[in-house]
Amino acid sequence: MQVHTVGEGTPEVAVVGAVHGDEPCGARAIERFLASDPEVDRPAKLIIANERALERGIRYVETDLNRALPGDPESDLYEERLAHDLATAVEGCLSLGIHSTVSYDEAFANVAYLNDRKREIAAHLPVTGIVDFTAVSDGRSVELPGFVDIEAGYQGSDAAVDNAYDCIVAFLQTTGVLPGDPPAQDPGFYEVTEAIYKEPTRTYRVRAKNFERVAPGETFATVDGDPLVADDEFWPVLMSAEGHDKLLGYRSTYHGPFSTVPVAADATDD
């Protein structure tokens, strides 16, 4: 794991890329940012997490790092030990994690257990949507306190690197690391309600488009040519036949513009 620090003092802000080694946009955007020799107003960490997987161009070496948090320093598995190191490195930090996907070409933000700190970060990112993954967040970085993730765009694309870089700059402006005013967009807010899993050895095709409403009775995908029909309306998130061995995607509910969504009464800034 590479940990680069800009500025003087103890960082309370962090950016994390390459949690998955086949999603290089975060590492490339961090490298671009560091190469710009930025002048900062407060310190920050920029972390390239899974170097081994990144070098091999694979999602993970032994187990998925983004399902292993907070990790185990005594584990026999490389990513479980790395998860502990990563969780320790970002402890106490407001953090931005950078991912990419095979299912959607624009940047969107992921949150869990939304609180005021996470709201402030997400509200100033140049993204097209904000998704609450609380219902399925177990073991993911987005579950960590003060952590917001983005999906920067298509895996391996130059556009994903550009989107990731723009989000890094906006995040560091929001947290006072960089001077300047971050964007003040108001994207839609989506709450994931459940995951949709695949059955082994079967062939799936997705018809629905991510972040577009699927009506009751509408065919949103096929399996071995047979239709998968929605019982109730939902908005697909990260839905793709190729993106994951076991997961087809997620159902979500659309709640309107992010600015209209209140923080839950029991949410804290811990």
Image (cartoon, rainbow, N blue to C red):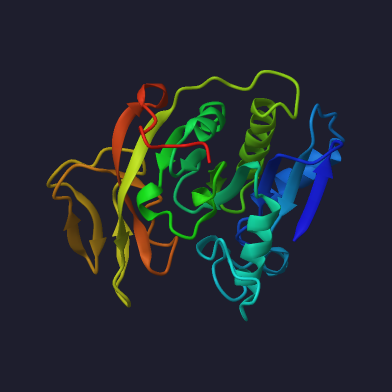
What residue appears at the point 49 percent right and 50 percent down from the top-left corner? 143
Q: Is residue 102 depicted above or below 12 in this figure? A: below
Residue sitting at x 19%, y 42%: 233
Q: Is residue 174 visible?
A: yes
Which residue is at the front of the view, 58 or 4?
Answer: 4
Query: Going by the picture, which residue comes out furthest to the bottom?
Result: 76
Q: Left or right: where does residue 37 sit relative to residue 246?
A: right
Taking the spot 63% from the left edge, 56% from the top edge, the residue there is 87
Q: Position of residue 155 (x, y in %)?
A: 57, 53
Task: Look at the image and tell me in which quarter the N terminus lies.
Answer: bottom right
| For residue 28, side relative to residue 109 (left or right) | right
Identify which residue, 18 or 90, lies in the foreground.
90
Q: Can residue 106 be seen?
A: no
Q: For the point 80% across and 41% down, which residue is it?
A: 10
Relative height, residue 18 to residue 258 (above, below): below
Q: Nearer the viewer, residue 92 or 119?
A: 92
Left or right of residue 67, residue 76 in this image: right
State the image coordinates of residue 172 (x, y, percent, origin top left): 69, 31
Q: Percent position (x, y) of residue 270?
A: 53, 41
The image quadrant that residue 38 belongs to is top right
Question: Residue 205: x and y, percent?
Answer: 31, 60
Query: Can you tell which quarter of the image residue 202 is in?
Result: bottom left
22 w.r.t. 123: above or below: below
